[in-house]
Amino acid sequence: MTYCCGMLLRDGLVMLADTRTNAGLDNVSVFRKLRVFGKPGERVMGLASSGNLSVSQSVVSTLNEGIKNPETGEMENLLNAPTMFQAAQLIGRAIRQVHISEGRAPEAADPGFNVSFLFGGEIAGDRLRLFMIYPEGNSIECTVDTPYLQIGEHKYGKPVLDRAITYSIDLYTALKIGLISVDSTMRSNLGVGMPLDVLVVRRGAFDADLDYRIGPSEPYFRDLRESWSRALRAAQAAIPVPTYKTLLGRKLAPAILTDIDPEEAFAEAAPPSPQQAAGMPSVKSN
Amino acid sequence: MTYCCGMLLRDGLVMLADTRTNAGLDNVSVFRKLRVFGKPGERVMGLASSGNLSVSQSVVSTLNEGIKNPETGEMENLLNAPTMFQAAQLIGRAIRQVHISEGRAPEAADPGFNVSFLFGGEIAGDRLRLFMIYPEGNSIECTVDTPYLQIGEHKYGKPVLDRAITYSIDLYTALKIGLISVDSTMRSNLGVGMPLDVLVVRRGAFDADLDYRIGPSEPYFRDLRESWSRALRAAQAAIPVPTYKTLLGRKLAPAILTDIDPEEAFAEAAPPSPQQAAGMPSVKSN
């Protein structure tokens, strides 16, 4: 399993990736999933991968060797792609080339050939962009409405992003929220683990603002995990317990296993009565 | 989609279920998924279902009609089962009976036949128990180490349970945390929706302490959702932004798309230097 997240913000780009790979629970390793590359002053790019490690490494090796353009004969790679979109398309072509070299049909839903990429960055003359590239080689692009994309185990860490990430937040606040998102994921899925690789790119800088590996004993992240746990406990404790009162003396019908009776269903559709709103026991018979 | 959660605690049992069913995004309905039944003073049970609605309704109808015991000839149902374990086994038999009546093999991984149940409650003479029953009819039982079970869309709402639910917490605090868990799930998955059905059973009461439907405009739950959002924003804002300093002047190698170099990997495995711990820029060349 894997968790990678990319955020496209007003001030720039933030990418995070864990490093745990596993072939079963009994074969766990550390592999870099977030690769950073570019030419300072001209382009900077981050490529994060999830899915089958053999496939993602083959795609990266294919991109490194370059793909021959059938029309011009030129070897195309990510460092000479004229725009981010054409670079994303090149990654798609590399995925399809690996499909073919492994004798698989990319159209088929082949569970062995699962690979996805987050690809973000900026090339001089183009705008800062972030793409998610699918196993079939097609892609979607991140926009301001939902300024983040995720690949891998995305569910555990999504609620905090949904609540906190907006296009206009500061880059390092976004990195902080991303780290909270990774923390939530690591707590619930053993397939996602330390160390973490992070990339911060400031719009127009054409270089990494931060390209860093967070190790297991790194003090900021350790403090963040503890602070967040403490804050969640405090937040939860500050909410009062439900005021729904005990419906004492209610007689359980011997066979209400069947669906709710229509009368009750109708009553539930109505707004709560003043008694209910005040937390008083409601007169409920079933 | 569905989200149901059951918690087995020192003081009793809490169960929650949403009510949204869908056949595609364009066909959404409300169906009760948490059914409460029993004989006051003797037994109380909650049965929550997820998966194919046709299958779960057929299983419930089969349980209502009773299943003939081939040895005694007696019609067995949940209201005459001698123990919770035998009641859980009866539900498993009902699932297998529906499999057979629909001409499907329960062993086969048949995506159309996905149904799971949470089944909790207490029968006089037996202890309070909570089971998760799988599509194959087998079950697992909840224990003190992880005092909750989930079915359906379990991932979004799991982090808050992992952090906050312990065996010894108060029943209505557990209900509150369960509602936060449902809230997180509803925010991220449109297949989970209001109203919610909740059941609270106090150990040894053999009746429901609370058997309630929370409607969309219910004031406590609306306040809980707002308070939780506000508290999460405050918690996030209270954590300082990362102190990792900008690695300015770093020259990006033209092709570091390939894996990290061994020297850097070795450096990362070591504990952070005093400079790193103090948030100073580290001397990092690649």
Image (spheres, coloured by chain):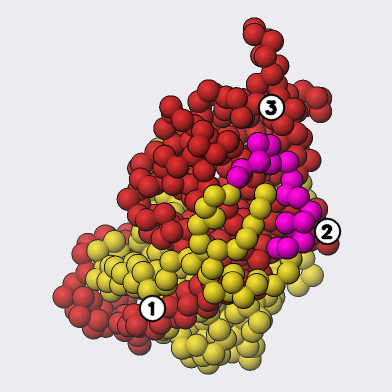
Chain colours: A red, B yellow
Q: In the rendering, which numbered label is found on residue A235?
A: 1
Residue at image coords 64%, 7% = A71
Question: Can you identify the residue that label 2 sits on?
Answer: A27
Q: Position of residue B249 (x, y in %)?
A: 54, 49
Residue farthest top in this picture: A71
Foreground residue among B104 and B222 = B222
Residue farthest left in this picture: A274
The subunit letter for the residue under badge 2 reads A
Q: Position of residue B76 (x, y in %)?
A: 65, 70
Which amino acid is tagged 2? Asn
Q: Nearer the viewer, mark 3 or mark 2?
A: 3
- Residue B152 against residue A79 in the figure, above or below: below
The span picked out in magenta is B251-268
Disc with the residue nearer the chain's start (1 vs 2): 2
Which amino acid is tagged 3? Ala
Q: In the rendering, which numbered label is found on residue B52?
A: none
Q: Badge 2: few (under 14), some or many (20 or more) residues near its Cα, within 10 Å? A: few
Question: Can you identify the residue that label 3 sits on?
Answer: A94
Between the residue at mark 3 and the residue at mark 2, the CA separation in whole angstroms equals 28 Å
Disc with the residue nearer the chain's start (3 vs 2): 2
